Image (cartoon, rainbow, N blue to C red):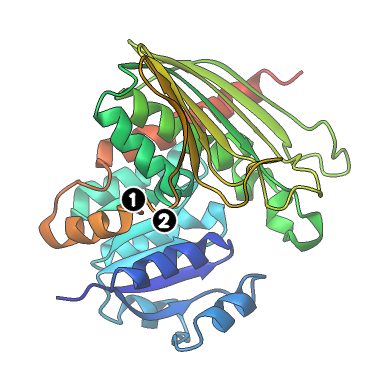
Amino acid sequence: MTLAFIALGLDHRHIFGMTENMLRIGARCLGFWTDGTPQPLEGYMRRFPELLRFNNLECALSAGADLALVSAIPGDRATLAIQAMHTGHDVMTDKPGCTDIEQLTLIKAAVAETGRIWSINFSERFEVPCVTLADQMVQNGVIGKIIHTTGLGPHRLNRAIRPSWFFSRKRYGGILTDIGVHQIDQFLHFTNSKTAHITMAHVANHANPADPELQDFGEIALRSDHASGYIRVDWYTPDALPNWGDGRLTLLGTEGYIELIKYVEVGGRDGSDYLIMVNGTRCEKIDAHDAGLPYFSRLTNDIAHRTETAMRQDHCFEVMELALRAQLLAEEQIL
């Protein structure tokens, strides 16, 4: 049976990848709903001209879909996800899935009440082929036990096209909630940690004083009972870089290391998705762009069989809670 989905909210361009990847695996989109005319709307309609636009949210939720994709303004995502779950939909939401602890508590309650899946599409893991290959290599033990991760998430500000909500702390959730959540997800996943302790969290606005609620720099140190990690995120990508950010992830194992060159290789080969892998017998750079993106097919299978192959629900909750707590810790320490 073909999975049917709807898209709710087009306020972030991540809805493009979410929709495209679901269509690619054979799912059927019944249409989309969004409030007003957010900036990505024109491009979305141009890329998916065959999709129906629902007149209102109620029409979208009653269309008979199995899955709702949510990419509204971050501060609104929890409400939409909860409405979708209570109308019989599983949910794939853009990150961050919510912007405060109260919202997360309500989401957990909705999952418990409805039995629906609430899955955050951590695109820096789920939409990056070199992460797929690195995951396979780690599972095969090629660098031993992972004891440390370093996650770097630089982003381009693109001020001219940012909507007003992007500069509102309440609406976007803070830089650690918004971007740092990716690296927290990867730390827990690759170190096989169920939880972690935030040992340091810091946010700042160094370069945008006219926008006092924007945080343009953030960092986190964290550890579990058998691993530790460092995270740095920012909005400083220079204009000369050919993409939005030179995202990197380094996995340190007891028998080697893997560095993931996710999006761009400055001064190197064109394209993205390369791995540098060094262990006791190998020292090489690997092209990983054909490694695939299994999250979307796995989530489809989970929806059909009520399993957790794409991502455990408790992992999703824990990542979001750690990001929110890191954000609060960092803001408590601002002088």
Among the 4 quarters of the image, the one containing residue 331 = top right
- Graded by Cα atoms within 10 Å as few (under 14), some (14 to 19) or many (20 or more), the crowding at tag 1 reads many
Q: Residue 116: where, in percent of width, then height?
A: 22, 56
* Mark 2 secondary-structure assignment: strand
Would you name the residue on which mark 1 appears?
119
Q: Residue 119: where, in percent of width, then height?
A: 33, 50
Would you name the residue on which mark 2 appears?
93
Residue 176 is at least partly visible in this image: yes
Q: Is residue 19 above or below residue 129?
A: below
**Extreme residue toward the left, this view:** 305
Residue shown at 84% from the left, 40% from the top: 208
Horizontal relation, residue 329 to residue 114: left or right: right
Q: Residue 30: where, in percent of width, then height?
A: 35, 82
- Graded by Cα atoms within 10 Å as few (under 14), some (14 to 19) or many (20 or more), the crowding at tag 2 reads many
Q: Residue 206: where, in percent of width, then height?
A: 82, 31
> Label 1 sits on what residue type?
Ser
Measure the C-alpha gap from mark 2 to mark 1: 6 Å
Q: Are marks 2 and 1 in contact (CB under 8 Å)?
A: yes
Residue shown at 42% from the left, 27% from the top: 187
Horizontal relation, residue 147 to residue 303: left or right: right
**Extreme residue toward the right, this view:** 210
Which is more toward the observer, 53 or 85? 53
Among the 4 quarters of the image, the one containing residue 137 = top left
Q: Is residue 251 above or below residue 183?
A: above
